[in-house]
Amino acid sequence: MQTSENPLNNHLLDPETGSIKNLKGFDSQHPPDPKLIDTCVHCGFCLSTCPSYRVIGKEMDSPRGRIYLMDAINEGEIALNTATVEHFDSCLGCLACVTTCPSGVQYDKLISATRPQVERNYPRSLGDRLYRKLIFSFFPYPHRLRWMLVPLFLYQLLGVQKFVRATKILKYISPRLAAMESILPKITLKSFRDDLPTVIPAQGEKRYRVGVILGCVQRLFFSPINEATVRVLTANGCEVVIPKSQGCCAALPHHQGQEEQAKALARQMIDAFAETGVDAVIINAAGCGHTLKEYGHLLQDDPEYREKAQAFAANVKDVQEFLATVGLTTKLSPLSEKPLTLVYQDACHLLHGQKISVQPRQLLRQIPGVQLREPIDAALCCGSAGVYNMLQPDVADELGQQKVQNLLNTGANLIASANPGCTLQISKHLKLQEKKISVMHPMELLDLAIRGIQLSVTSDQ
């Protein structure tokens, strides 16, 4: 009998016995739940909303196809190998399929169970391991990342960045490093400072005591958003607490299956807010918020932190969710002399993960003179997806180009985005299309409206 091999499932027949050899698959530590897998009836409703399927066009790069692979690996019919892992890696984790599915398939739980299995049981190439090590050794650690700002600041200041981008030399060396460099925002002296105090009093009558999470990328590259968030909260009667011991929310490693690192960061975050006595823990970044609300699931096997994690997660609120619930109490002024046309960009982990869509629009419409427009394919991912645009740059670039075109087609003068990853991705593709239109966080817009500062809006559409 001859040995046969299928490139997808890597079934190997023993030439002597004719039986299938043991295949490397999932381990026993929380593999994808067969009960959740069985809820998928393979109807195909997810296909049109899945960004990776729309770009790649292969069945196995759709939620339905990946669920088939999970089931087959669970059953020992196919292996966890290069051919199967590439289909799991192509998933952006945008969760649009969860929103769309008429059968209520919890694909979010299935893919979050699969990613750690891949990281534990699939040997990635040396280059892939080193690149991922670079990402997860720096991005989730703001203090380490701040040290990287010095050479990056000089890189921009001395004009090296202009040379690198003009010659596209980095793309020839490493397309992934080129993708990472392409979303690098402008580094200013403000990026090196950490000025927010531990406690900021409410303006006027104190209504709530809230904690604020600063984030990692947000803290360093988008610190004005954090400052605006604090001003909006205090202006609306909130005393703000910012524990200095807080670190990363664990979103980046969690979304890529780096389970132990994610658990350690989650424990640190829970401990940072343990004695603050806050009414709510506020986050202004969509991807971070989704992970923070998943702490109960992430630490379900930790006897010391299980209940703490559940309580913490129940207390987490996206800032727009919180403000829409408690209401604005301060006066808002127009942002420009003429009506300002905005388009709000739905971040996937806010829209699909946290089911928050109406609240940001409600807040923005309270600003006098604001007119909101809606883009087509509003629920389709922009391609950022945490670090996806650095790991899968080709798919991410096509999605980014489509997203920006859809936003521009609204004719809006300004784009509102509530996630730093989305903002970086959209800003990159606006620049590639040579469009000069600002991207701002809703909290920045509310802050300006509260302080009576008008925008100088320019658009070359």
Image: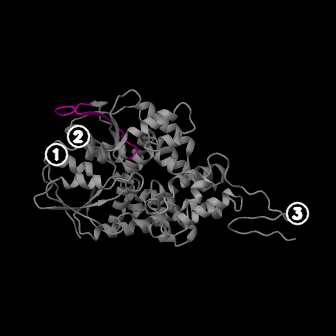
- Say what amino acid the circle numbered 3 marks: Thr
Q: Quadrant of residue 200?
A: top left
Q: Which residues are magenta?
A: 200-217
- Say what amino acid the circle numbered 2 marks: Arg
Judged by depth in the image, the label closer to the viewer, 3 or 2, is: 3
Q: Residue furthest bottom?
A: 57
Return the residue nearer the eye: 22 or 207. Answer: 207
The answer to whether 86 is drawn above or below residue 299 in the figure is below
Return the residue nearer the eye: 156 or 98. Answer: 98
Task: Tell me the distance, in whole angstroms, between the alpha carbons under discs 3 and 2.
Answer: 72 Å
Task: Tell me the distance, in whole angstroms, between the alpha carbons under discs 2 and 1.
Answer: 9 Å
The answer to whether 308 is drawn above or below residue 421 in the figure is above
Query: Does residue 189 appear in the picture of this structure?
Result: no
Q: Secondary structure at mark 2?
A: helix
Q: Which residue is mark 2?
A: 231
- Image x and y of residue 241, in percent: 31, 32
The quarter of the image holding the N terminus is bottom right
The quarter of the image holding the C terminus is bottom left
- Image x and y of residue 128, in percent: 59, 55
Judged by depth in the image, the label closer to the viewer, 1 or 3, is: 3
Residue 235 relative to residue 397: left or right:
left
Q: Residues within 10 Å of mark 3 (few under 14, many from 20)?
A: few
> Magenta span: helix, strand or loop, mainly?
loop
* Colour scheme: one colour
Q: Quadrant of residue 274?
A: top left
Q: Residues within 10 Å of mark 2 (few under 14, many from 20)?
A: many
Nearest to N terminus: mark 1 or mark 3: 3
Q: Residue furthest top?
A: 275
Q: Residue at x 67, y 67 (%)?
A: 8
What is the number of the mark on residue 450?
A: 1
Q: Residue at x 58, y 63 (%)?
A: 66
Residue 379 relative to residue 79: left or right:
left
